[in-house]
Amino acid sequence: MFSRTVLSLTFLACASPLAPIATDSGGDPDAIRLSHLREGQALTVDFHSQGCFASSDAHLVFEVGSGEVLVSGSFRMSGLRNNRGPAELASHYLTPMELVQLDNMLNLYRRQERQTYCWSTGKHTTTLRLTDPDGSTRTEHYVTDTCIEYTFSKEGDLTTMRARANMLFFNDLTRPLLEEMIATAR
């Protein structure tokens, strides 16, 4: 009975719409975590997404200023008509909730890299490079399929796909630029 109650409470907590629940249960102390960035560190993320008919590249830079994490960068999409080249991401500060949600995404990548949830040809290639104030660097690299961003459930003959809860993905940060590029390509 106890384990069923704990399991139910765990599922309830993980689905909380009010606040993200950190999904890291110990893990590697050297793993890169956005919520642990310190003054003077810079995290560069190069994120490539490849689909059937188009691909995109994001170059994101996360830096700490005045105790907050600032993200800036650029986004390029290929496979669209009238593509005008890379677009600059407006610099903005991330909330503590967004940082935890990004860390949750990285924990998912660490646990399930190279999973094959879908039959799609969609792939994400993500490289993180953390530079410390002394110039030393740490790098992490992940290859995932695009379906990693979703949970799947089967009810009878129907399979449903839902965005994962408590996670923010790098393409969520560049989505406004993608939507603008698609709108102008028509």
Image: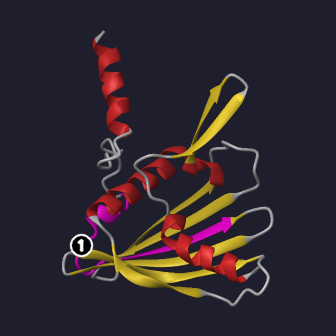
Q: Is residue 161 above or below residue 66?
A: above
Q: How many marks?
A: 1
| Residue at screen point 69% across, 22% down | 156
Q: Quadrant of residue 179?
A: bottom right
Name the one closer to the observer, 35 or 143. Answer: 35
The residue type indicated by label 1 comes to Arg
Q: Is residue 46 visible?
A: no
Frontmost residue, 176 versus 112:
176
State the residue in front, 27 or 64. 64
Q: Quadrant of residue 138?
A: bottom left
Magenta region: 31-49
Q: Please identify the residue farthest to the top as the structure is shown.
A: 1
Residue occupied by mark 1: 38
**Image spot of residue 38 (x, y percent):** 24, 72
* Residue depicted at x 33% and y 62%: 99
At x 38%, y 56%, the residue is: 101
Label 1 crowding class (10 Å Cα cut-off): few <14, some 14-19, many 20+? some
- What residue occupies the far bottom of the structure in this picture? 84
Check if residue 24 falls in the magenta segment.
no
Q: How far from the left and from the top, in percent, is residue 114? A: 62, 49
Quarter of the image with the C terminus is bottom right
Q: Secondary structure at mark 1?
A: loop
Give the percent coordinates (x, y) of residue 86.
62, 87
Quarter in which the N terminus is drawn: top left
Q: Could you tell whether 141 is left or right of 85 in the image?
A: left
Please say which color scheme the image uses: secondary structure
Give the quadrant of residue 129.
bottom left
Q: Position of residue 151 (x, y in %)?
A: 56, 40
Horizontal relation, residue 62 to residue 84: left or right: left
Say whether residue 66 is visible: yes
Which residue: 51% across, 65% down? 172
